Image (cartoon, rainbow, N blue to C red):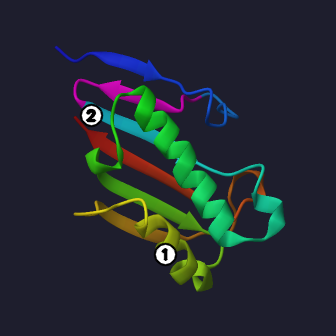
Amino acid sequence: MSTKKIIFSPDAPAPIGPYNQAVMVNETLYVSGQIALDVAPSGDIQAETRKVMENIGAILKVAELTFENVVKATIFVKDLNNFGAINEVYGSFFTADPPARETVEVARLPKDVNVEISVIAVQ
């Protein structure tokens, strides 16, 4: 039988709609897309990406996981020309064997941020 547990970190933004930061089902953690509300207006895509990854790290920590447990990531960006800068910061959070991933350019993101990242991690 599956067990479902809601994961919440006070060190990451609270949900802005009817969803949770993350849900653990058995040994798999599904982390909702994270954004960087407090950094986005600056226009510094690397600072914004770093904050997004720190938010993900805070959620992983509550679930007693690390970036080493991440097996899948999805990156949504408003401008694919920022791919290199985003990739540089994103990659620094994975010391070995990075997860599977796709990067998708979209017309708009919540709260008009420039990048949103979601991940799946396993124990």
**What residue do we see at 22% from left, 29% from top?**
27
**What residue do we see at 34% from left, 29% from top?**
64
Residue 69: quarter of image: top left
Residue corresponding to mark 2:
28
**Would you place residue 4 above or below residue 91 in this image?**
above
The amino acid beneath tag 2 is Thr
Residue 65: quarter of image: top left
Magenta-colored span: 19-27
Does 117 lie within the magenta span?
no
In this image, 88 relative to 78: left or right?
A: left
The amino acid beneath tag 1 is Glu
Q: Residues within 10 Å of mark 2 (few under 14, many from 20)?
A: some
Distance CA(mark 1)–CA(mark 2): 27 Å
**Would you place residue 47 above or below residue 57 in this image?**
below
Pointer 1 or 2: first along the chain: 2
Q: Quadrant of the C terminus?
A: top left
Residue corresponding to mark 1:
88
**What residue do we see at 28% from left, 60% from top?**
99
Q: Quadrant of the N terminus?
A: top left
Residue 80: quarter of image: bottom right
Q: Position of residue 82 (x, y in %)?
A: 60, 80
In this image, 16 relative to 26: left or right?
A: right
